[in-house]
Image: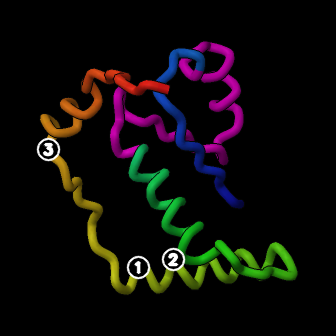
């Protein structure tokens, strides 16, 4: 019996009694909640971007099976040479950029 794994944010809608009851009645569906303010979810988006740029973009696939095969081969190769993602900026650098004041002194 196959399982379906869902990664969901910690939004309150997933915690409603009706949702919990439905999930309880469907044990093959496994829900994984992200921590509140989870920056790791951004890394998941980065990972999908890497797959898209390095395995899918400009590819020609005659079927979904061909596409799946290409993605699986990429992941297997990645796992053989894997290394952790590393943040390259400090929290202070990120916050300084996020809070940067914008000015417009253009004369158009």
Task: Work out which residue is located at the far front of the displayed protein and give it.
Answer: 107
Of residue 25 and residue 33, the one placed in the foreground of this image is: 33
* Residue annotated with mark 1: 79
Of residue 59 and residue 48, the one placed in the foreground of this image is: 59
- In the rendered image, residue 74 lying in the magenta stretch gets the answer no
Q: Regarding mark 3 in the picture, which secondary structure is present there?
A: loop
Crowd rating for badge 1 (residues with CA inside 10 Å; few <14, some 14–19, many 20+): few
Q: Which residues are magenta?
A: 14-41
Label 1, label 3: how far apart the Cα atoms are: 27 Å
Up the image or down, 18 lies above or below 38; here it is: above
Q: Does the CB distance between marks 3 and 2 fall below 8 Å?
A: no
- In the rendered image, residue 36 lying in the magenta stretch gets the answer yes
Label 2, label 1: how far apart the Cα atoms are: 6 Å
Q: Does the CB distance between marks 2 and 1 fall below 8 Å?
A: yes
- Numbered circle sitting on residue 90: 3
Q: Is residue 90 left or right of residue 73?
A: left
Determine which quarter of the picture holds residue 15. top right
Residue 57: x %, y % from top left = 65, 72
Sequence-wise first label, 3 or 2: 2
Crowd rating for badge 3 (residues with CA inside 10 Å; few <14, some 14–19, many 20+): few
Q: Regarding mark 2 in the picture, which secondary structure is present there?
A: helix
């Amino acid at each position: 019996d196959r399982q379906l794994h869902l990664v969901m944010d910690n939004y309150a809608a997933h915690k409603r009694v009706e949702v919990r009851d439905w999930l309880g009645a469907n044990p093959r569906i496994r829900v994984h909640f992200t921590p509140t303010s989870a920056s790791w979810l951004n890394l998941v988006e980065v990972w999908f971007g890497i797959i898209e740029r390095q395995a899918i973009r400009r590819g020609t696939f005659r079927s979904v099976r061909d596409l799946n095969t290409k993605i699986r081969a990429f992941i297997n190769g990645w796992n053989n040479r894997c290394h952790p993602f590393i943040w390259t900026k400090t929290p202070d650098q990120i916050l300084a950029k996020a809070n940067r004041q914008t000015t417009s002194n253009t004369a158009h």
